[in-house]
Each structure stands twice: as structure tokens, then as C-alpha cells.
Amino acid sequence: MIRQPEPKPEVLSRRDEIVAALRALVPPHPLSGESVIADPLRLKPYETDGLSAYRQPPLAVVLPSTTDEVASVLRFCHANGVRVVPRGAGTSLSGGALPMADSVVIGLMRMNRILEVDFDNRLAVVEAGVTNIGITRAVEERGFFYAPDPSSQLACMIGGNVMMNSGGAHCLKYGVTANNLLGLTFVTIEGEVLRLGGAHLDAAGYDWLGLVTGSEGQLGVVTEVTVRILRGPEGARAMLAAFGSVEAAGRAVDAIIGSGIIPVALEFMDRPCIHACEAFAHAGYPLDAEAMLIIEVEGSVAEQDELLARIRDICAPLNPTSMKIAESAEQSAAIWKGRKGAFGAIGRISPDYLCMDGTIPTSELPGVLTRIGEMSRRYGLAVANVFHAGDGNLHPLIMFDANDPDSLRRAEAFGAEILKLCVEVGGCLTGEHGVGVEKRDLMGVQFTARELDQQRAIKSAFDPGWLLNPSKVFPLAQAAG
Amino acid sequence: MQTSFTPEQLRDPDIAESNRILRTCVHCGMCTATCPTFLLLGDELDSPRGRIYLIKDMLESGRPATEEVVRHVDRCLSCLSCMTTCPSGVNYMHLVDHARTYIEDTYARPWPDRAMRRLLAFLLPSVWRFRVALIGASLARPLARLIPGRSATAERLRAMLRLAPAHVPGPSAMERPGVFRAQGPRKGRVALLVGCAQQVLAPSINEATIRLFTRMGYDVVVRREQGCCGALTHHMGMRAAAMRAARANILAWHDEITREGLDAILINASGCGTTVKDYGHMFRQEPEAAAAAAVSALALDVTEALWRFGYRPTREPPGLTVAYHSACSLQHGQKVTAEPVALLRRAGFAVATPKDAHLCCGSAGTYNILQPVIAGRLRARKLAALEALKPDLIAAGNIGCLTQLSGGAVPTVHTIELLDWMAGGPQPAAGGAARGA
């Protein structure tokens, strides 16, 4: 099991007192009748997130409904030296919401209101617990959308997106969360409510918004988010290009990006993934292919036609086994349903998986995929590859059986080797899932000791007592507090 | 997901089945997004993933269920929206069914709760008992506001009276056992589940079904032995009662299959349809396993059957807009989504579907009585979404939803009544109300 900081005995021994204080701070929910969970049985479902290999029930869970309630909980925790783990939908794949035994989990799921939509200035103000897709749903009637689209967008919440600087398939064109963010309401560990940025693209002074985005819940708790909304394109079409080898598909990605075309999305799936996703989405994926690309272009029909024709020409010398263009909005939707459900669909072929998240230069794709295949044979664990190929963001899914401890150990070692390879070829440890607990011990592969010290100094400036999500991001031995 | 059952526990076939289901779950959390109770309550424990975790822990421990777990499992609507969303194919339905039986077998509910559940299990599945109770309730309806207190029991009693109709229709001549002969050349032979509560609340639904299928050339068989499908007790974890009800249907229809043969078993209450289609699984370890599987294989929602049999309207379209409410049992339980809408369009209605169509209306069997506060919120939400479409009528394929959504600004009607009307049947009462509006 993953190592955690030693629980503070003085916190564990005051458990009842802490729970009573939290109950006084956050009134019970009108429908469920409670806002603080503290009995061991019901804390268990909160012991993990989307990375269920690592588990630890917290001391208590508190479910506030307002920024003021969040602030009062943080103020209390700060005054009493209690560690805090913020949580959104609990879909993190890096264990970002993994609790500690002496921590209070602040769940933001009840803060799910859309506060303001301003079409004239193309922005929306929402609470942290609004789902990613919830923002688009709130603005789509007028033809707008919120661009970053993690695969978990149906469930994941915008507060978590900000804290992990999440990406998604369409970030190739539209950028990640940071590029679509205008402002935040941000509560410090002292319980102070800060407004960072606002209803404008840039703010005077230091870029606090940039500093806080992607800080993995270690600098403060986000309660409200102002995002940019964009007018949707005239139209979009997805194309499936299938190849007889993983390497050929990798070369096609490199050739498309190298030609200067920026498709709105360029996604890669290998054979195991194609089969699992087709079983879920019935999208007409090519079941005979070794690898497949989903290439989406957008714009006017003429623009789409021209881009698709050029992409066909680029792919042709690589001997695609088939190329198919979606003929309707329903077909495109089915193609994306399969891709967005890819991680979960692996549940159909394996009881458990670890989802890696390294990023590499696209020119390295064919070589890296070959080496991942070799590692898979060496570790004796199957791997399914699905990833944002256009920006070189890999998501190898290492399949294992959590009921077999040795299988988990091998999966962890396999994952670490993939990520080291990413750094070795000039890439980085994480594209969009965050470091969390999963990759914290590999931070030394990416950064020098001095670089890590600088980052820790920033954390200490916001949270001198290291109470906010302290077991994440940094190698445990070096984490302060 | 990791599980920790002992080899001895896994020898129990129900545990083995639940273990298989749990191991399919990868804890990705997608299901939380489309769960009505998670949306309203904002607590992992009231989401499918949280319940799966609680159930896993309960079954692994082998200890009796506790109040803490029961509270959250009870709040589950069994709407199965999570199963539509789940990319991994987790069979939440069979898992929560197992959990409900486990709870019923090991947990002593407080007496008012126990009494209420026994009362519902006693009244609802019996046509005559339910009719008598309903007449009583309809008379007592004005008294609902006089029930004092905010206790769960008081809320439930008020909910029961509010759900009772102002007028209870008399028994229908058309539901008596027998064979309703095809008109014109005979194309086939089908059995109809005339069910329990529905025929008391709205006999017009079975009447429309029999008229329409006989007119289309099908003999419609109503077997004397058939009755409640078992869903009501099944969803309260009362396994023995559910199996008893289901067994009677299985034996009756299987007899019919082996004698004269059946092209389909028609279900016009989709809540029942989900259960009849699951008989094969419910009886997998019983002597009737093969018969149950044969019955499940023939079970069709009426709209599925009409689609296959080639429904054709004969009347001029009335120019009405229908807001189609997709019952959870139909859209999530049976994955029947396209047929009802396509048939209504073919019949000449303008069909609109509401925002957040995947969310339950709060009916969910006995849920609107047992969890009246949450059910009331869901009803209000659903009605607002439906009424925003400015429809003349609200159509649905399940009596539970129709009861739950009645009393709003728009009249409700079963899909089959509209289809029968456009194919030569009488105008449904709601159709007249819509026109008058």
C-alpha cells in the first residue's frame, strides 16, 4: 500500500471533538439530513478515487454548500493543525483525492450551481462542483461550449479540473484548462477568501491564476470558477483511420502534425482498446486493425472536406487498412462515446488498470510505442494504449489484477518505467492527470533537487504548516510538515 | 476493483455472482454523473459508486446489514441510469437486487418501516385488495393534510394519499382470462401480462393493448394464473414473495408456449418488463430455469412488439404535441428508447423529449411512497422539464410514471392508448382533455 505521512496522534485522539466542531460549522443538508460523515463504515467509500489501487479512509468527510462554509472549515482545520484533502467528483487517476488517516476530506459535490452566464462577454461563473460537461450543457442552447474535455467530463468537476489543469481530446486546438480560465474564488488554509483574475483575459501584477492552476489542492481550495466559453464551430466531422501496426499509426500522427495541419482532435487507440470500446459504444470501430486514429476536423463543410482529403493523402503511403468518415452527427457522437469511455471500458477485459499519463514529442511516438510493447512482454502484463496523440500525451493502460498483490507491484514498476522513458525522450511525467500520489516518487526523475526545493517553497508560502493535501506531488521523504 | 471474499463465501452462488460484478467495476466514477440521488444529495454515499462500495463491504464482512448501509441502499431508485452510463458494463441491477435481499434477510427494520413495507407488499400485487384499499384512500384523500408531524411515517402516509386517484375505475370486462381472437387473418399469438396495480388504476391501458393487437391480427392470451410480475416485492428485497409471483407467471406462459406457442409475451408496464426479462436470471438456479429463460426471451415491451409487427395508423393526425417521458425501466432497464418515439411519430404526433431525459421522475415502484421527499423533488424537476416543451399531452410507457406525473398542468396518457387511438381505437380520456385545453 502507498506510504503516507505519519498521522498526527494529537489529531486522531481529538477525533470526536473535531467531528463535533465540523458539525457545528456546516449545517445538515435539507434532503440527506447530514453534512459530516464520521462513522468508519461510511467513510470507506471515500477512501479512494479513480485510482482505486490506493486506499485510506479519512478522519471525517465534510460536505459544505457555500464558500463561507468551506472557509470556516479551513479556518478550523488551520487553527487545529488538521490536514485537509479537497475532493471533487473523485475521478482522479493519479490519486489526487486520496485521504490520509488524520485528514478531513472537503467534498465540493454540493456546490453545483451555475452562478452566471454572460454570452456577450463569453464567460460563465460556476461553482467548483459543477461537472465539466455541465458548463457546456448550460450554454449550448445558444451555440456555445466550454472547450477542455477530459474523458471523464461527464462526471469530473471543474474545481478538480482547475487543480489538475486537466486537458482532453480537443485541447490540441483549444488548449488545456489554464488556457480557458479567467478567474477563481480561492480559499486559503487560513480561511481567507481570495478572488484571483476575473471577467477578463489577463490581470495586472503577478499571474496568480497561473500559479494556482494545477496546484493539486496544495495551495488552497477552489470554490468558484470563471471560465471562457466559446462559440461552437460551424460543423465538425470525425474520421477513423485504421492501420495494420501500432508503429504505422504512430508515424501517421507524426506526419499529420508535421504537415502543419492542426486537427481539432487526434486520438490513438490500439487493438485491445478498440475492442473494449466497441463493445461499449457500438461505433463501428475497425475490429481487424492493430491501431486506429480518430481524427476530427471542424469548420465549414468545404473546410472539413479539404482537411479530410489532405489527411487521407498523408495517411495513404502508410497503408491504412481502412479509412472511414462519420456520415452523421450520431456517428460522430458514437465514435466519441467509445473514446471517452475508454478507461472504464477496460473494465470489460481486466478487473483493474493503472492509467499512465506521460507526454512525449510526437516524433518519438513510434519508438516509444514499440518499447512499451517490449516492456509489456517483460512484465507479463497486458497494456492497452489510448491517448491524445496529437499533443503526444500517452495514456497506456496497464492491466492487472488487484486481488494478486504481485500483479499490482509489477504494474507499478511497469508504469514507472514508461514514465521514465517519457522523460528520457524529452517529454514529461504528466500531461493532464496531475502528479498526485501516483507519480510523486518519480518527480526526481524530472526535476533536480533544487527545482523541487523551489516548488516546495511556493507550497510553504501558501501553507506553512503543510496541511493542504500534503502527501501528494513531492516525494514523501522530502515533503515538509 | 479489488475484492476480498473468502473461498468459502464464494461457494455461495449469489456471492460469486456479486463478486464477478464488483470485479468489473473500475471505480471510474462516471456513474455518479447521471445518478438522480447524487445530483440531489451531493454525497458519494448516495451515488452508484458509493453504494457499490457499501454493498461490497457489507457482503465481504458477512455481518448483518446496518442502518447506515440500509439508509443509502434504500435511497437508490433502481432507475439503472448508472447502467446506461457505465463504460465497464457493471451489472448494478443484479448487485443491488442481491443487496436488497441480503438486507431483508439480515436487518431488522424499525417497526413502522417494516409495517409499511409489509402493507405495500400485501396490497399492491393483489388486484382486489389494491382496489379496495384505493377506494378507501381516494375517500381519505382530503385528509392528507390533516396527518400531523414530519416523521418518515407521516410523510409516507401523506404521500400514499396524495398518490391515490380521485376516482377509482371499475373492473374491466376485457381483462378476464381467456383468448381475445385476432380480427381478420391471424398473424400470430401473443400473451399479455395484465398485471396488478395498473389494471386497477388504469384499465384503459390493457384495453387499448388488447384492441390494438387483435386488430393487427394477433390472438391475445390472458392466462388465469398470471398476476403480479414480482417486481414490487423483488425491489423491496422480499425474495420469496417475488419468486412466488414470478413462478406462477412462468409456469402459465411456459404452458402456453409448449401448447399452442407464443410469438411474444407483451408487457405494457415497463417496470414489470424489466423484471420479466430478468426471470431467466432470477431462476437460474431453480428447477424452472429453462422455462424462465424461455419466457424472458419472449418478453417484449408493447412498443418493441408494435415496431416488429409493423404498426400502421389509420386516422388523420390530430395535430397534438406529445412530450414523451422515457420511463427508466424502459430506457435504462430494457434499453428501449427509439421505438416509442418512432411509433408516436409514425402515428402522426409531434414528439418532443425533455431536457435531462435520463433522470428518473421519482416514481420507481414503491419509492414515491417510501422516499416521498426525494421522489417529490424529482417529480417537480421532471414536470418542469416536460412542461417546458409546451406539450398537449405527456406520454409514457409505465403506470408508475403516469401516476407520479399526473396532477400537473398537462394530462398524462400511456403510449399504447395514443397508438390505439390513431389505429382506430377510441380517443383516450386524456386526448379529449388536451383538445379541450
Image (tube, coloured by chain):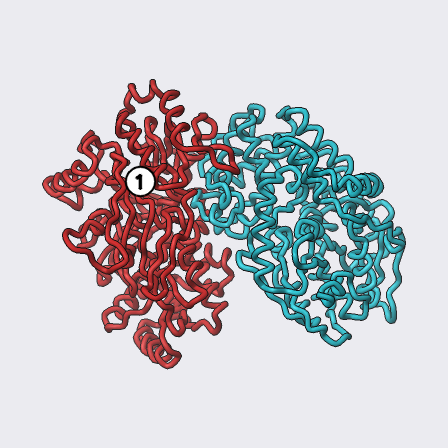
Chain colours: A red, B cyan
| Residue plotted at (81% across, 39% down) | B136
Q: Amino acid at mark 1?
A: Glu
* Pointer 1 local density, CA inside 10 Å: few below 14, some 14–19, many at least 20: some
Spot occupied by residue B246 in the image (x, y as percentages of width and height):
75, 42
User: Percent position (x, y) of residue A355?
Assistant: 35, 47
Q: On the image, which quarter does residue B386 sit in?
A: bottom right
Q: Is residue B61 above or below residue A54?
A: above
User: Of B358 and B237, which appears nearest the observer?
Assistant: B358
Q: Does residue B294 appear to the left or right of A335 in the view shown?
A: right
In the rendered image, the quadrant that contains the C terminus of chain B is bottom right
A464 versus A416 height, above or below: above
Mark 1, residue position: A412
> What's the chain of the residue with tag 1?
A
For label 1, the SS is helix
Q: Is residue B55 above or below residue B310?
A: above
Nearest the viewer among A9 and A433 is A9
Left or right of B126 in this view: A252:
left
| Residue B159 in picture, x, y percent from top left | 67, 40
Whether residue A272 is visible: no
Q: Residue at x 16, y 55 (%)?
A: A204
Residue B386 seen by the camera? yes
Q: Where the N terminus of chain B falls, by quadrant? A: top left
